Amino acid sequence: MSGCASLSGEDGLDTRQLAVQYATLRVIADSDSIDKGLVLERIEQARTILDGEQLVSISNILDQVVSQSEWDGLDTLDKEYLTLLLLQVESASVEVDHVLDERNRVRLLTVLDWIEEAAKRAG
């Protein structure tokens, strides 16, 4: 089963994909501090971590995203959008505090693909 298939609803609709991509586009459109380039840079960093040979947990990845995003400098709306995206990423991994197995790694990479796709479409 592919990562996309494992995240789709029973009816085949990728409602999670729509939510992730909508939130990504809103963050980029509405934020003064987050732009398309930054999102694509963070995606690449996350993929580098996931493709590395070290053991990775989702909590480590999320901690890095938050620390590199200058979280305290974001306005409330940006924090809400990013929180939604992070929750979607977190939901792609069933065991948040455990090392990602291959299935969950694929699921997480699928969510990153959705975010990247939306960021590339952003104006």
Image (cartoon, rainbow, N blue to C red):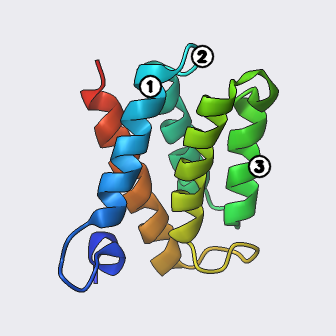
Q: Which residue is mark 2?
A: 33
| Callout 3: SS | helix
Q: Which residue is mark 3?
A: 63
Depicted 101 relative to depicted 20: above or below: below
Give the amino acid at mark 2. Answer: Ser
Q: Pick the quarter of the image with the C terminus.
A: top left
Q: As drawn, which residue projects farthest toward the top?
A: 32
Q: Position of residue 58 (x, y in %)?
A: 67, 63
Categorize mark 1 by other alpha carbons within 10 Å: few (<14), some (14-19), many (20+).
Answer: many
Nearest to the observer: residue 51 or residue 21:
21
Q: Are marks 1 and 2 in contact (CB under 8 Å)?
A: no
For marks 2 and 3, the one nearer the N-term is 2
For marks 1 and 3, the one nearer the N-term is 1
| Callout 1: SS | helix
Gap between marks 1 and 3, in whole Å?
21 Å
Q: Is residue 90 left or right of residue 2?
A: right
Q: Which residue is mark 1?
A: 28
For marks 1 and 2, the one nearer the N-term is 1
Residue pictured at 29% horizontal, 29% vertical: 120
Residue pictured at 18% horizontal, 77% vertical: 12
Gap between marks 1 and 2, in whole Å?
9 Å
